[in-house]
Image: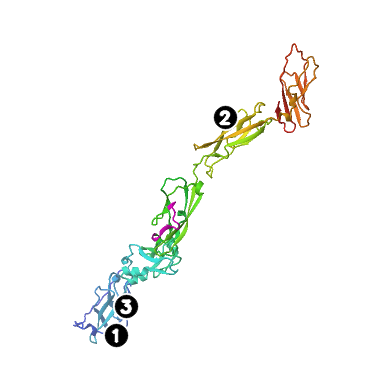
Amino acid sequence: LNDTALIKISLDDEQEFAVPNDYSQISLCPNEPVLVSDQSLPGTVIQDITIDNNNISPYNYYILSGDTHGLFSVSNLGKLYLTSPMLNKTSEEFFELTILISSSSSSLSYCRTNISIVRTPKWSYFICPAGPIEWTVEEESPIGTIIGTVKEILLSINNSSELIDKIHMKFNKTYNDAQSFLLNSQTGMITSNSRLDYEQKTSYSLSIVLEPDEFICSISILIKLINKNDNPIVFDVNSLVYNITENNILPYYIGRINLIDIDQLYSYDYEYYLKNPTKQISIDPITGSIILNEQLDREYHGFELQFDIIAMDNKEDNLTSKLIFYINDLNDHGPKFDQEYHSVNISKSLRPDTIIFQVNATSKDPIVNGLLTYELINASDYFYINQQTGIIRLKNYLSSIIMNYTLTVQVFEADINLTDYTNIFISIVNDDNMYFNLNEKNNCFLEENKIINSEVCTIGFDSNDFIYELIDPMKYFQIVGSNGTIINKKIFDYETDQHEYTVTIIAKDRENQVEIIF
């Protein structure tokens, strides 16, 4: 679509005018101007400066000065408005305009107005603290104690308080230490929210995130606690108890007395002393080092020694406790028999494996440092010893011809070259007369040609307690078990048979089956 229009432009006669030299003499334009944001759009009306017009001649308005960037204009209706979108590119906080007002029927007049610009904060100008902010607070301060205010720090490094007022703050929750504090999101004031104990934690690390999102800024906070002397100084119990082996090379360093100063403020002021000085040990008053000066023997001193100690500071605040030594025994004493000589009487009729005697050796060392072993020095066919218990037993039946026997027993301890000896004199009591009629021992005769089962002799006694057995490899004789009567089982001829025969008679206890050989 194309169209044309006819425009008629007429020019008035030229008029001369001049701006007054004294700016203060120019009156203010009618009505107050509104605040203009630097984000306002062209066409925004800022002020109505219309003059009452009682005549029909219209007024014309001209901006004479102050609009250095060509941002404003006044319509014929007296409306001062924004004509340019470039206001946000300027930096002035206000513009002072001088306006000429004219009409064809009246003289020229002037008015002035001040346009204030509301500047939108520019986050690009914001300075984020580079390093961590460090604050200190005394331990055990009451809950709610003010630690510091972030806003004050931001104001000190940024010129725009208006920009700072728009900031919101919050803790970075990935830092666990934040649980101990509260944060005011507007002012950045940090207050304690739990007990602050230097002995549990000496410092806290926090991170504060700033909003809005136009800029990325997180502020590191380091809160250090000031240590107070709020815990008593005590002895370190572990430095007062020692296990010491006897017979150490002297002088012998045992250890060092320590104090527990949780606050770590004053423990170095203490000196250490024995309440009752002794030659056995000495204590360095400065370091608390313990030196052993005399040999410790558990067999003499016992298993425990105690000493009273004192720790003194320059304020005469004394600490007292006990220094305890537990003496560990060395295997330095060999085994000893309780007697050097023993005398024992035994019956000739004892059966094998019967206990004869038990020897016993001990050591002055109060603990079992090694294995004691017993041995018979003189080998014997009749006796043997248990190497661990020292029990001596009968190995075989005793011969009738043995009247006494002497055993020598040795004891020694494993891993130590120390031994001891004892002698055991054994008297053997012949108790054959309890089971045999010894008067008949040499009266066993048999005439030749006696019939079988003829009585030769009676070697035993009539008893309900004993029974008799006969051992004859040739089977020429038998015995009556109830009384020990020997009978023949062969008819002998003096001219053709032996004249003497030897047999073995065994008497047995009916209940215990103890064998006594004759």
Q: Mark 2 highlights which residue?
A: 378
Q: Earlier in the sequence, mark 3 or mark 1?
A: 3
Which of discs 3 and 1 lies nearer the camera? The answer is 3
Indicate the position of residue 458 as horizontal and vertical percent values: 77, 24
For image coordinates 75% across by 13% down, the residue present is 494
| Residue 111 visible to the viewer | yes
Spot the residue most to the bottom.
Answer: 54
Q: Mark 1 highlights which residue?
A: 51
Q: Quadrant of the N terminus?
A: bottom left
Identified by mark 3, the residue type is Ile
Q: Mark 3 highlights which residue?
A: 46
Spot the residue most to the front.
Answer: 439
Indicate the position of residue 457 as horizontal and vertical percent values: 77, 22
* Left or right of 492 on screen, residue 177: left
Cα distance in 3D space between marks 3 and 1 = 16 Å
Colouring convention used in this rendered image of the protein: rainbow
Q: Nearer the viewer, residue 477 or 60?
A: 477
Q: Nearer the viewer, residue 278 or 86?
A: 278
Cα distance in 3D space between marks 2 and 3 = 136 Å
- For the image, the number of numbered tags is 3
* SS of the residue under disc 2: loop
Which of discs 2 and 1 lies nearer the camera? The answer is 2
Spot the residue most to the top.
Answer: 495
Q: Quadrant location of residue 158?
A: bottom left
* Residue stretch in magenta: 268-281
Q: Earlier in the sequence, mark 2 or mark 3?
A: 3
Q: Quadrant of the C terminus?
A: top right
Identified by mark 2, the residue type is Asn
Determine contact: label 2, label 1, CB under 8 Å: no
